[in-house]
Image: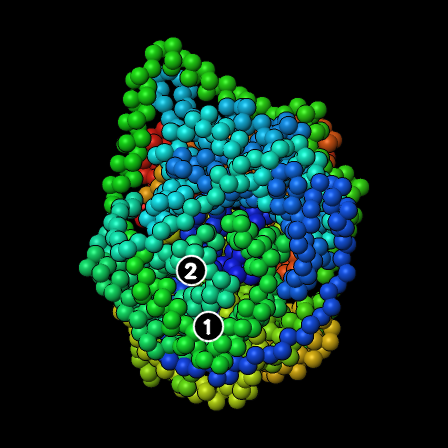
Amino acid sequence: MLRTVSCSASLSSASPFFRFFRHFPRSSTAALRGPARNLRRISSPSAAGRRVLLRRGLRVSSAAAGRGVNGQFSRLSVRAVATQPAPSYPDVSQDEAEKLGFEKVSEEFISECKSKATLFKHKKTGCEVMSVSNEDENKVFGIVLRTPPKDSTGIPHILEHSVLCGSRKYPVKEPFVELLKGSLHTFLNAFTYPDRTCYPVASTNTKDFYNLVDVYLDAVFFPKCVEDVHTFQQEGWHYELNDPSEDISYKGVVFNEMKGVYSQPDNILGRIAQQAISPDNTYGVDSGGDPKDIPKLTFEEFQEFHRKYYHPSNARIWFYGDDDPVHRLRVLSEYLDMFEASPSRDTSKIETQKLFSEPIRIVEKYPAGRDGDLKKKNMVCVNWLLSEKPLDLQTQLALGFLDHLMLGTPASPLRKILLESGLGEALVSSGMSDELLQPQFSVGMKGVSQDNVQKVEELIMNTLKKLAEEGFDSDAVEASMNTIEFSLRENNTGSFPRGLSLMLQSIAKWIYDMDPFEPLKYTEPLKALKARIAEEGSKAVFSPLIEQFILNNSHRVTIEMQPDPEKASQEEAEEKSILEKVKAGMTEEDLAELARATEELRLKQETPDPPEALRCVPSLNLSDIPKEPTYVPTEVGDINGVKVLRHDLFTNDIVYAEVVFDMGSLKHELLPLVPLFCQSLMEMGTKDLSFVQLNQLIGRKTGGISVYPLTSSVRGKAEPCSKFVVRGKSMAGRAEDLFNLIDLAFLCLQKIYFSFMLYSPVRLCLLLDAPNVFFCLDCEYNHSDWKTGFVCRDIIQCNPDTETDSINRMNCLLQEVQFTDQQRFKQFVSQSIARMENRLRGSGHGIAAARMDAMLNVAGWMSEQMGGLSYLEFLHTLAKKVDEDWEGISSSLEEIRRSLLARNGCIVNMTADGKSLTNIEKSVEKFLNFLPETPSGGLVTWDGRLPLRNEAIVIPTQVNYVGKAGNIYSTGYELDGSAYVISKHISNTWLWDRVRVSGGAYGGFCDFDSHSGVFSFLSYRDPNLLKTLDIYDGTGDFLRGLDVDQETLTKAIIGTIGDVDSYQLPDAKGYSSLMRHLLGVTDEERQRKREEILTTSLKDFKEFAEAIDVVREKGVAVAVASAEDIDAANQARSNFFEVKKAL
């Protein structure tokens, strides 16, 4: 498994500002691809510190900051935009639409996305349909309904889960899972917002795409769940009683999911803020469900909610891609014509929250551990509702721009001042949110001492007043504007389908009966904003916005959150007391009936659908699957003795480059400092360039630079692959600037650590908590960190076509470096600790996986040292060492630089069109000439591992994360492509049914790392512990007893090929090719593995059972869980776990 720890000059692509054209966050969980897809409908973490309203209104915080001074936008010119003729796409005539029951409302060519968009209205029901035609093969369908709840019982959320559990045409337990097993989907999910529910799918295969569309349409309009109380009980909640002598408990997938959500302080703060800022409309309750309220929901209320809102009259439907637009309407008419018009469109309207006449303040508690100084664990957040009426596009864009200027980068003034104040550890719930009816702005800090809560609030207000009075630095404004333009030109949504990103942009207005076209057309508003800034100056544009919407806005809510080590146990005691009263009110007959009903539900959950029933779910045939993998054009050459990989692909005049350095000379003890080294490269200033100026320079000159370490086992080799990667992108004409800035970063670091001995103290930035991502590239799985959280790979972006000074003389700026503020370094350490602790609560499965890998292979140990529990322990030690041995820290960082920076072992990877690749060779040569020939020190042997033992990591939580893993290569197993099919089948059947459906966990899945041989089981937000481990141990017997027909086997094969052939944009294709090169995966091997996948047989499943038994017999278990559950486990199985207290 390939792991990366990424650090970059960062801009949250998930910020509301970027949601203007990239609505849904780019997630490192890659739309639940690979094993993580079995965590059905898990929302991905977004960039740390920025507040974004995701499904169920979860706000994911980020660290956004910066400083500004008064300045005019003198260098921003308004460029003319050439008008291009609209391409010709298939059309739907008015007559064709009329025959199918639709009227054409409006039609426009959207140049921003090179698409023809047509809005239709179904005449009978009033259902609106956006049909977007273009050349994108990654087709997208989505149906969105307004679903405003009136309480916090979680009806919309439970329905979101339940409607995908069987329908009229597909009456099996879970068609959703059958699609997971046997589809080539590029996206398959659903999510609940505070006021709407979305059901999107995507695929590049037209036949597969319409299979997905039909299953989703039938699920939404004709679900079985409204007639089947068992589905409501499974997905929502039910009483569980295995024996009348035992205690009653609550079970339910959503119930346990939300218990996990309510165990995370950041999520609790976000929910309280949303409900406090809009107490009088639907946002005043939790659409996801409060665990205290979910058991109040009745099946009758559940049925009525579906009847009321799941109707075509209340639906907005989206199509996007290169498929036939007439066929789209034909498919829809078959469903929509079955309905009459309904008043649901009117009854579902969202009421406006009236603005407050005066600010309010709320104090709440959150569950906290007993370790550490709780007096310094307060949180405070100031929130504004910005307007009663919808904002025009120009104002919305300007506010988003303002949000980025204040909070979007480490150099942004509000962010920078708050973090450098020392009043708290990190930002929380900060940023603009514009996905709901009324926009909001919030900014806050966590890790605040009780004495400093008021000071944080005052600092926020004073800084905002100062920004309104003085304005922003002209370079900051220029860099921000360039960031927007580069991102618009690139239109890079990663693994997230572009059509879905556009859908979520459009629906943010469309769902409130506003123009669905408007959010897609940014060119003219952006041009107007630039013109206004150029004419009036940035202060005239942004200062009135700060004053009107923030400073003079009385609708302000301040939330103070106080740590309470008793809260978790009190809530558990309250729940237990309620259940005891329920049991006390039952007769013996009632208890016997409840035990019988519990067993009946379990039996139904664990009984598979018969093969004849499963045949109703549409799927592809093996004949629909290409027999060969997708090949990326790769030319291997060299420049000055350095290996260079070139990928000739169309990239819209953008160059993507990676420079890879070998970590083979790095000493073991320096490994945990590598994340700090990465951040130092991006956030150190020179004698003549402050950190802020350097940050802005990157923003103006390039499309982004990021740095991170990468580790992976290599199959057949004892030594791991350990690399240090510098990634960057720019317009082709500015590639020299890109490589010069990389030079600058390294030169900065060289001077920083050399000069430290002369100039103390050093200003060093530690912003990274070393999360991981891995790529199984021999099978081409692109798993975005299902194991350890997410990677901060957001980068500063710009449009480099604006007028700039040459940076070829940059090296003269590097002779002296300013080092200031040792306390700031300590603050960055505190921020990293805060983020790691948040990951422990929210992504405990990742921490458990990293811990197990560290016990089983060297690459896993390396990664865990930079991003797991060991890293958190290192940070705690480092926080003290900064005061005691600051000089030693600096010396170690300098040693890291000398160990990495060399031409020897370096590889350059470039992706662009052929002409651009040729043109940038001189820039690459110049860059390579700067590098030393060899690193300092000799090669180091990497052989570290954690001791093999079962571990339980204690945190304050209401749910658990349970893992078990072992190395199947140790049994003599030799890799075969069938292993990928088998592991996927285990996740989608055995683990899905037993851990999630029957066990009540939010997710259960497995992964096979074919590089190391480690086979891992993991659960997510799991109410169980030992029971889940027993399920893992039963996997071998499950495989031995398996009897699958050819159709089931074919589905498993096709689903695996869907993962192998996951959709990639050009930059991802070039990067994946680089990873395969580093790990020695040849095209011949890929072809052989594909053939083995396509010919997988039942015999392969039986043989794999023998290999997987090693996990049961010799594997290690790691759980991240509550102290109570760990104590119970150790009592049930004497000292099964060695206990480590983390929080």
Mark 1: give few (<14), some (14-19) or many (20+) Cα within 10 Å: many
Residue 1126 in percent (x, y) is at: 35, 36
Q: Closer to the N terminus: mark 1 or mark 2?
A: 2
Query: By what rule are the colours in the image chosen?
Result: rainbow
Amino acid marked by disc 1? Met
Q: Is residue 1046 left or right of residue 954?
A: right
Q: Can residue 190 be seen in this view?
A: no
Residue 618 in percent (x, y) is at: 71, 35
Relative vertical location of residue 310 with respect to residue 65 in this rendering, above or below = above
Residue 960 in percent (x, y) is at: 41, 39
Label 2: state its secondary structure.
strand
Q: Which of marks 1 and 2 is in front?
A: 2
Whether label 1 touches label 2, CB < 8 Å: no
Relative vertical location of residue 227 with respect to residue 380 in this rendering, above or below = above
Label 1: state its secondary structure.
helix
Q: Can residue 622 be seen in this view?
A: yes
The residue to which callout 1 is attached is 682
Amino acid marked by disc 2? Met
Relative vertical location of residue 959 with respect to residue 914 in this rendering, above or below = above
The residue to which callout 2 is attached is 432
Residue at the image point whose x is 59% and y is 30% from the top: 223
**Disc 1/disc 2 C-alpha distance (Å):** 25 Å
Q: Which image quarter: residue 1135?
A: top left
